[in-house]
Amino acid sequence: MRKIDLTPYALPWREDLSEEKRVFAVRESLAAVLFNNPGMDPRRLLKTNAIAEKIEQSNCYVLLEDAEYDALVDGLNGTSASQLTRDTVELVRRVLEAPVIKVIQKEDQESAS
């Protein structure tokens, strides 16, 4: 699993925006990025939407299974160059450098004790 930080981050270089709007909405942006896949078929659309909902319902971070993470990276790869701006550097870093988290199912953990 991958753990992705969903907390918004500041955009201090955006002097064209008021100070309260100099914040990048990570959760909403990641959910939108998932749909930047030109080869998406209807079945994949439904799976992608389920991942988007998981991200939208998470708070400070989200844990994505490998297939979910791969779908997110596919979405990043499908993002046009004009959308990849200085504002998105931190977003891309959070995804591509997301730490791998080992998850042990609770019943497995109890039997190991």
Image (spheres, rainbow, N blue to C red):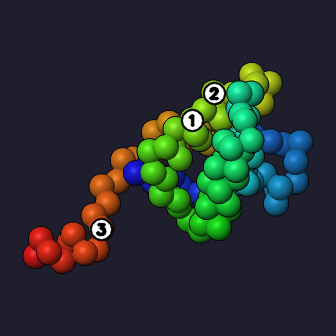
Residue at the spot x=53%, y=55% of the render?
A: 5
**Height in image: 54 above or below 79?**
below
Q: CA distance from mark 2 to mark 3?
A: 32 Å
Q: Could one spot residue 10 in this view of the protein?
A: no
Question: Which of these two is toward me, 58 or 35?
Answer: 35
Q: Amino acid at mark 3?
A: Gln
Q: Amino acid at mark 2?
A: Asn
Residue 79 shown left or right of residue 6 in the figure:
right
- Return the x and y of residue 94 as percentages of the image width and height: 53, 44
Quarter of the image for the C terminus: give it.
bottom left
Residue at the spot x=18%, y=77% of the render?
A: 110
Residue 60 shown left or right of residue 88 in the figure:
left
Q: Residue furthest front?
A: 43
Q: Are marks 2 and 3 in contact (CB under 8 Å)?
A: no
Q: Are marks 2 and 1 in contact (CB under 8 Å)?
A: yes
Q: Which mark is residue 73?
A: 1
Q: Residues within 10 Å of mark 1 (few under 14, many from 20)?
A: some
**Height in image: 11 above or below 106?**
above
**Disc 1, SS:** helix
The tag earlier along the polypeptide, 2 or 3, is: 2
Question: Which of these two is toward me, 31 or 65?
Answer: 65
Which residue position holds label 3?
105
Which residue position holds label 2?
77
Q: Residues within 10 Å of mark 2 (few under 14, many from 20)?
A: some
**Disc 3, SS:** loop
